[in-house]
Image (cartoon, rainbow, N blue to C red):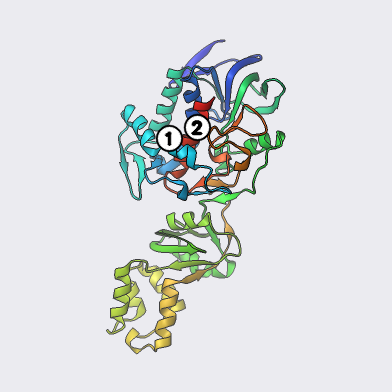
């Protein structure tokens, strides 16, 4: 078989016939590559199949092109799953510091942006190169532009593809979720699961912008592009970061975080003055001659203050407001009830909520309880992290758990 060097790893050139490998990994994202070289370093002959023209396409766009590759605060509390305990084993055995050590080994400069998030100083392509070099050093074979047509198992797994047919003793599904279809996201991983009778929990977009009601269009659209700090609350969960107003609704870190907990019909409460010093300013302003607009323009973009106060604030000095007016205004400021029609869906979602039912998998090896040798890792599993490097850490940890068990 002729092969060539590309991006540091071996890429097959021609359409092969039936070939056997110890392990076939489907999906050339971060988790797939990590699992592939981890297994290969343990002496396994590993083939990685990727349907895109190159590996790591989702890594490229992550973190604004700088890849927020992990979060040093990652724990089970930062993940949504039908079984909150499922991710504990993998996360404990491969920590953020383990991945940081790998980054440092490759001489990649990085920094902490905020809230434990670790970013490359340079480009996210550095992480792709790092993973590719690890694959090359371990002897992983990578085949791109390879569309999976059918997966079956008798004594061995058989993978029919546009680039030929392969057999393997073990099969790892690292196909990701439905988010970012323009990068090639598909439901392949869920179809493989269903092919083998493995349960998939309900799926929906996560870490996704919310869309406003039609009757609120007049309020939101003129404010598109403005951002302000808020605390977003849905049920018992709150996140305090920035909110960005868009032409269709709201986005920004606080909204993306709370969107994973919000469902259509649920109430979303926004504290528009989350900082304690802002609260004190508001209280002291009641004793002065400032109007709500004059006061709030100090904390918010002027355009937002004007639009919001025109709707919700008395047009007179706060000192002349009645007790009831002050109470209503304070409630609107700290518990502004915002209603939305839905989300912008998978094209704008950073992750997919739901996935392979964790009850179907071993938390130590990520192997199917029904089908020996079949493993699922990363986003395709019903484990979804918060915004800020948590989903990458789950990819590394679940890949490590699987790769070391193969």
Q: CA distance from mark 2 to mark 1?
A: 8 Å
Q: Residue at x 51, y 25 (%)?
A: 36
**Number of numbered labels in the structure image:** 2
Could you say which is closer to the camera, residue 343 or residue 69?
69
Task: Quickly name the residue at label 2.
Answer: 401
Crowd tier of the residue under label 1, counting other residues whose Cα lies within 10 Å: few below 14, some 14–19, many 20 or above: some
Contact? badges 2 and 1 (CB < 8 Å): yes
Q: Position of residue 185 (x, y in %)?
A: 58, 39
Q: Position of residue 282 (x, y in %)?
A: 32, 76
Is 364 on the left or on the right of 332, as rendered?
A: right
Question: Circle 1 sits in a helix, a strand or a loop, which is it?
Answer: loop
Is 136 on the left or on the right of 316, as rendered?
A: right
Relative to 378, say whether 77 is above or below: below
Relative to 251, say whether 283 is above or below: below
Q: Position of residue 231 (x, y in %)?
A: 42, 63
Crowd tier of the residue under label 2, counting other residues whose Cα lies within 10 Å: few below 14, some 14–19, many 20 or above: many
Give the quadrant of residue 63: top left
Task: Quickly name the residue at label 1.
Answer: 94
Along the polypeptide, which appears first: circle 2 or circle 1?
1
Give the quadrant of residue 291: bottom left
């Amino acid at each position: 078989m002729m092969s060539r060097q590309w991006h540091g790893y071996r890429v097959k050139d021609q359409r092969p016939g039936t070939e056997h490998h110890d392990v076939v990994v489907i999906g050339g994202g971060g988790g797939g590559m990590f699992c592939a070289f981890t297994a290969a370093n343990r002496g396994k002959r590993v083939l990685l199949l990727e349907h895109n023209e190159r590996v790591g396409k989702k890594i490229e766009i992550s973190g604004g092109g700088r890849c927020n590759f992990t979060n040093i605060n990652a724990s089970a509390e930062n993940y949504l799953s039908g079984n909150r305990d499922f991710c504990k084993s993998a996360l404990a055995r491969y920590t953020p510091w383990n991945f940081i050590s790998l980054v440092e080994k490759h001489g990649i400069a990085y920094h902490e942006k905020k809230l434990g998030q670790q970013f490359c100083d340079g480009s996210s392509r550095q992480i792709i190169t790092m993973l590719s070099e690890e694959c090359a050093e371990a002897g992983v074979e990578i085949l791109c532009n390879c569309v999976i047509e059918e997966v079956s198992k008798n004594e061995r797994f058989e993978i029919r593809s546009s680039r030929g047919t392969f057999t393997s003793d073990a099969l790892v599904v690292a196909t990701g979720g439905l988010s970012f279809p323009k990068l090639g996201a598909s439901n392949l991983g869920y179809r493989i699961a269903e092919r083998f009778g493995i349960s998939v929990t309900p799926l929906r977009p996560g870490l996704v912008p919310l869309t406003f009601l039609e009757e609120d269009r007049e309020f939101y659209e003129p404010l598109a592009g403005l951002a302000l700090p808020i605390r977003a609350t849905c049920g018992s969960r709150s996140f305090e970061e920035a909110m960005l107003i868009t032409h269709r609704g709201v986005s920004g870190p606080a909204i993306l975080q709370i969107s994973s907990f919000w469902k259509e019909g649920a109430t979303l409460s926004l504290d528009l003055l989350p900082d304690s010093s802002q609260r004190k300013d508001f209280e002291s302003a009641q004793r002065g001659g400032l109007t709500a607009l004059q006061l709030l323009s100090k904390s918010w973009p002027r355009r937002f203050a004007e639009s919001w106060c025109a709707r919700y604030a008395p047009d007179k000095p706060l000192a002349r407001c009645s007790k009831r007016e002050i109470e209503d205004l304070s409630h609107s400021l700290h518990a502004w009830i915002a209603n939305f029609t839905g989300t912008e869906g998978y094209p704008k979602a950073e992750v997919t909520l739901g996935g392979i039912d964790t009850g179907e998998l071993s938390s130590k090896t990520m192997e199917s309880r029904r089908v020996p040798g079949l493993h699922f890792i990363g986003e395709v599993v019903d484990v979804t992290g918060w915004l800020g490097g948590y989903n990458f850490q789950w990819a590394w940890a679940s890949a490590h758990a699987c790769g070391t068990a193969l």
